[in-house]
Image (cartoon, rainbow, N blue to C red):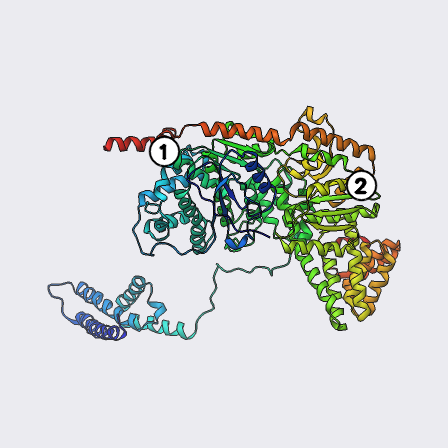
Amino acid sequence: MSNTLKLIVGALAAVVGAVAQYLAIASLREPAGAFDPLLRFLTIQLAAGLFESIALRVMLPARYREPRALSMLLLWLFCTFVPLLGGLVVLVSCAWAAVFPGAKKSDQLADVPRPAFVTYLVSRVSHGGGARLQARLANTQVASTDRLSALVAIQNMPTRTTGTLLRDLLADPLEDIRLIAYGTLDQAENEIMQKIFQASKALETTQADSERYALNRLLAEFYFELVYQNLVQGAVYRHTLEQADRYAQAALDTDPGDGALWLIRGRLALARGLPEDAHAHIGRALELGFPRERLVPWLAEAEFLRGDYPRVSELLASLGNAASLPTLKPVVKYWS
Amino acid sequence: MMKELPNRRAADADVCLLLEGTFPFVRGGVSSWVNDMIRAYPQTRFAIVFIGSRREDYAGVAYALPDNVVHIEAHYLYEDVAADFHTRAVEGDAAAFARSQQLHDALRDPRSGRDAGALLADMIPMIGASGALSEEQFLTSRAAWQTITDQYQKYCTDPSFTDYFWTVRIMHKPLWQLARVAESLLPAKVYHTVSTGYSGFLGALMHYRTGRPLLISEHGIYTKERKIDLLQSQWIRDNRGVFERDISRVSYFRELWVRFFEAIGKLAYDAADDIISLYEANRQRQIIDGARAERTQCIPNGIDVQALAPLVAERKPRSHKVVGLIGRVVPIKDIKTFIRAIFIASRTMPDLEGWIIGPEEEDPAYVLECRALVESLGLSRNLKFLGFQRIDEMMPQLDVIALTSISEALPLVVLEGFAAGVPSITTDVGSCRQLIEGMDEEDRALGAAGTVVQIAEPAAFAQAVLSLLADDDRWRAAQQAGLARVRRYYTKKQMIDRYRTLYERLSALPDRARDAMASALAAQCPMHGARSKNAQEAR
């Protein structure tokens, strides 16, 4: 129904309602005839209430018009049983409510605590070796299709976390498992080896010192990545550490002020079992302004390997709340 | 220099070899085996059907064709070929698509009791150019669209219908091309495929079309190799959102491709009269993949032991030891593990040399990676890439044959090494353990002809090399064990005799007329039995 039509209907209903209301009150003054005067009044008043309620409903704000049947019933009751004033009371109440809305309270809403990062769970979940997948893979009694699915699932996880599991699977009795485990490790290694190959070729041809520095730094990082991701073993592992250190050293010869590269050299020295060198390299990174919180754990490891345990305790205690890594927290707690 | 495919055409042949991605275009173990087989039966007239991916993927014919190859044709499944029909909307035969769905259901659930082979035999007339399941019908009919959308709604767990639609179309496309090849292929007494896959499917079509026997000889297991490729491939899409994805489940399209190759493998096994594998573990795998056990048997590869025997005497004492890896420089041979093993072993035995003997054309990028690895390990002095060389010139110069492959069947190079008096160190793949240590009590009594180590373990491989080369008595014992084993179990004569018997038996089988075969198959299949009965009643 259009607005104009509504207004016309409302106006007509108001006129008819006013006339009916007048007739209802006037009927009370009439002498009693064939009809009971109260019954006559009530009959006319019912009709007047109906028309008044139609007229008033048009005037109500939209949100009070629904549900239609109930709002009509309420208006009709008011208009019928409180002659003249009932409708006006409703109208004024609605206007009052629209102008001064009350504070809304709902029992459907409740306070919840602020979300917090659950660090204790992080230390228990081994990413890539997620307990379920790892169990399925390790158990040779599980159906081969389930084990294959689990293996495909861990393909996209970081090799650093899945490397050990994948290496174990190279000896799996099922050939499909062996081959996919091999393929995953091989692909991860290939990606880094390709980058090493390209950077080495570029290093052979470049003359500029700045480029040589950048390429040496890149090569040190790539070789270190092979170690970090558990992709090299045994003698090749040791050779890779040496290569990484050689390129890091070459880069530092050009720019000795690269703190991050000194840290890499420190970590390489730790991996090679050279705590004195590690101590010196990490110390150098500290002097160059590398964030202390990130150096302290490695420095503590170097001190531990050197046998200076009070210094380990001192260093880790100095971390205090800065030890935000869940794996580091128990270590800090133990030593301090 | 590679050569063009010679033009040889014949009206018929004794044996039609169906070869996918191998002889005569690609060098390798299977190609050498095919070459040897053809030459071993000079009286038999062979036809060759080569099935490849795209013409440009092959550099030309790599083998001289023996004279008894009377017919050769090559077909490429992934070339851009314009459709030989005009695209127009057609209604399609819903009943025919329902029948194809029954075949799919039978392949989806082997326990359903439906005979997939019988269903395929029944459908062969329908997939021809004017059939109710022709390529045109599949690509343009409303019935095909309805079937695809129904299947998507029923089974697909990937949200992308677009990807599903195109995956189904691309997956099925080669099957019509193979059907066209089958329609025009020359008659032969025996169809012989050396793998399942597309050539196996063509073999099944030929078997059902002509009623002639199909022989399958598998070196590796095609379905398994495809599956491993597919499970690792990066091109298959997974459109599942974060909340839809159960990471422990393989994506639907990956699974669909795997099932496709399993299905066409199963159809080939169903059609085959005899299914040959090289060793027992592969025979068991074929049975798991749907081959009927009573049709399977093992025929190991054999080599010409007598021709290589003089090489044993040609060996001369040298100042340094040489470990040779004879094979193509490709990832499956895991050349990098060999390089690393030589690197580790050379730290203990500084004058040790590693020779990589094999063609380098197939995967130039991998060759570059291997050379870069040699360089980065500072191994240029100890490791040489010699390219393709004659075996008889190389063998007397080698002290150990190395095989670091991640997958093999029954590597001929190990047998050739044995016959030339060179022990082997191999990874534990295929039948290598059987070759080195023996297959049964009697064989094992001959002793170990080398060492078997786990794949991708350069340290273990290096240790095995060092311990074998440092102990002369052990090396000699291994040499004798290898010689004895190859002479007793792996001669070419044994292999040739067994295949001769097979060819003769299969060639002598009477033609099984297509109608007779279809009705025989229908008798095995309750659904077809019912259909035939209804058809008779209708008459």
- Judged from the image, the secondary structure of the residue bearing numbered disc 2 is helix
Q: Position of residue A200 (x, y in %)?
A: 72, 63
Disc 2 crowd, CA 10 A, few/some/many (<14, 14-19, 20+): some
Q: Residue at x 62, y 53 (%)?
A: B363
**Numbered mark located on residue B466 in the image:** 2
Residue type highlighted by circle 1:
Arg
Callout 2: chain: B
Q: Are discs 2 and 1 located on one and the same chain? A: yes
Instruction: Kindly report the distance in space between the C-alpha atoms of the residues bearing marks 2 and 1.
Output: 61 Å
Quadrant where the C terminus of chain B sits is top left
Q: Are marks 2 and 1 in contact (CB under 8 Å)?
A: no
Q: Residue at x 27, y 33 (%)?
A: B535
Residue B108, quarter of the rendered image: top left
Q: Residue at x 11, y 66 (%)?
A: A33
Residue B525 vertical placement versus A101 (above, below): above
Q: Position of residue B94 (x, y in %)?
A: 31, 45
**Numbered mark located on residue B514 in the image:** 1
Question: B132 or A51, which is in the foreground?
Answer: B132
